[in-house]
């Protein structure tokens, strides 16, 4: 085997796609900037305990771990930036009131999320800390949809769920953690047969409620059915009311909306509304997020929080990548002030200008125009 072969699901990004990803990154970061989101860049490596805080066992399995040769402690390559940003908010910034943060960088996974995805996603996202109302949930969700739009993604389908529904059912039944975890796994996998088996020993109300959850997927009629058939719990009522409000607010900004009361994405740390965006041509969610009010607790501040993230490499595959832009070739002339000014002006306007080296022919593969001198003026002409 050649030494330079890359590991499975790890790949180089070539110029056209790299430019496409970078263009999307700039547009999204600029959008987040004007909405008041300050960019942070956490380290790629941290001690494992910090990276796993509040994120559950799923992230532990996704994390690549190494031994720190200085301290002898176990370090991890980040698999998700959300816990890191929560640490920054809670421990480093320590601001009162609302904090808005954003980020854009690579993360690493021990295994790919699916057979079509890379182990090195380029994660970009935003997190809002310090506000517990639906207003912040809506800000984050609308911002996510705007980011998808400026990235060139259209025809978005949005799934909305609320982990408080499942949480209220299992807490009312006082289930032991092991049973709760197995029920969660069965629901998340939509494994009805396993769910039926696990529910056999539960009381009738709990059993019927849990078996109903996988069926509660669809349009707003789902919320009506949930109100009629789920337990009469104040927490469930509040959750359904919140989903109804969010659905109304976002109905004009997406192609379709569905409610999924068995969607427990991030249940280990999410505490409220969860959401996922989908688009034609991709079976996986292209962006997702939710409310997670307890993630900063281990860092000393259990602040209310909500956020979203997306993988720019995945988005790049969905949106057609344009060919790399052609440039302008210019002759090599020492101390030609007029030529240098013309080159500088073109570059200031975003044009690629490549200066030829003496003895080398025009680079026709990367340039389709050239600078030529007519009388005392330098002008651009087609090659």
Image: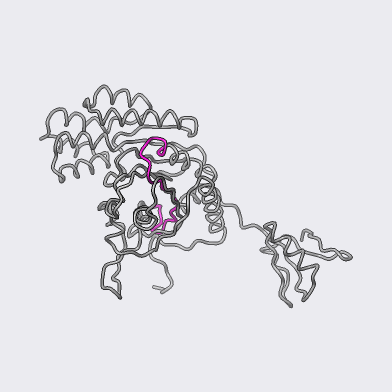
Residue 41 inside the magenta-drawn segment: no
What's the residue at 78%, 60% (across, down)? 380
In the image as oriented, which residue stretches furthest toward the right? Answer: 375
Q: Position of residue 120 (x, y in %)?
A: 41, 59
For the image, the number of numbered tags is 0
Residue 334, percent across and down? 77, 76
Question: What quarter of the picture does the N terminus occupy?
Answer: bottom left
Name the residue nearer the viewer: 24 or 138: 138
- Vertical side of 167 occupied by 364: above or below: below
Q: Quadrant of residue 231?
A: top left
> What residue appears at the point 45 percent right and 39 percent down from the top-left corner?
139
- In the image, 67 versus 362, the foreground residue is 67
Q: In the picture, residue 11 is in which quadrant?
A: bottom left
Rendered-image quadrant of the C terminus: bottom right
Is residue 382 at all visible to an observer of this figure? yes
Apparent side of residue 102 relative to residue 268 in the rendered image (left or right): right
Let me know if residue 117 is in the magenta part.
yes
Q: Position of residue 144 (x, y in %)?
A: 46, 43
- Which residue, as the protein is rendered here, is positioned at the far left? 201
Q: Going by the image, does 375 lie left or right of 281?
A: right
Residue 284 in sight from this viewpoint: no
Residue 174 point in image, percent of width and height: 14, 37
In this rendering, the answer to whether 330 lies above or below 127 is below
User: Which stretch appears magenta?
Assistant: 115-137
Residue at the (55%, 44%) spot, across then down? 150
């Amino acid at each position: 085997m050649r030494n330079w072969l890359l590991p499975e699901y790890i790949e180089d990004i070539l110029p056209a796609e790299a430019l496409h990803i970078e263009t999307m990154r700039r547009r999204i970061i600029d959008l987040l900037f004007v909405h008041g989101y300050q960019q942070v860049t956490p380290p790629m490596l941290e001690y494992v305990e910090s990276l796993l805080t509040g994120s559950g066992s799923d992230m532990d399995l996704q994390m690549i771990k190494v031994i720190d040769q200085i301290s002898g402690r176990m370090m991890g390559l980040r698999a998700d930036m959300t816990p890191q940003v929560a640490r920054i908010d809670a421990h480093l910034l320590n601001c009162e009131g609302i904090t808005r943060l954003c980020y854009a960088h690579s993360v690493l996974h021990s295994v790919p999320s699916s057979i079509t995805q890379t182990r090195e996603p380029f994660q970009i996202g935003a997190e809002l800390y310090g506000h517990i109302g639906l207003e912040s949930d809506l800000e984050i969700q609308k911002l996510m949809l705007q980011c998808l739009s400026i990235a060139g993604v259209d025809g978005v389908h949005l799934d909305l769920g609320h982990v408080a529904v499942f949480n209220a059912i299992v807490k009312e039944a006082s289930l032991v953690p092991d049973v709760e975890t197995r029920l969660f796994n069965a629901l998340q996998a939509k494994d009805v047969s396993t769910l039926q088996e696990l529910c056999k020993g539960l009381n009738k109300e709990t059993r019927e409620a849990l078996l109903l959850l996988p069926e509660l997927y669809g349009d707003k009629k789902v919320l009506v059915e949930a109100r009629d058939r789920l337990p009469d719990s104040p927490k469930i009522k509040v959750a359904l009311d919140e989903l109804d409000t969010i659905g109304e607010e976002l109905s004009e900004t997406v192609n379709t909306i569905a409610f999924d009361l068995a969607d427990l994405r991030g249940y280990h740390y999410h505490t409220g509304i969860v959401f996922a965006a989908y688009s034609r041509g991709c079976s996986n969610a292209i962006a997702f997020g939710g409310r997670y009010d307890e993630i900063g607790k281990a860092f000393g501040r259990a602040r209310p929080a909500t956020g979203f993230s997306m993988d720019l490499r995945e988005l790049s595959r969905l949106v057609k990548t344009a060919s790399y832009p052609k440039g302008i070739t210019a002759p090599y002339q020492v101390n030609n002030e007029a030529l240098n000014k013309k080159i500088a002006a073109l570059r200031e306007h975003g044009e690629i200008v490549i200066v030829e080296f003496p003895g080398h022919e025009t680079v026709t593969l990367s340039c389709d125009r050239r600078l030529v001198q007519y009388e005392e003026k330098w002008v651009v002409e087609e090659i």
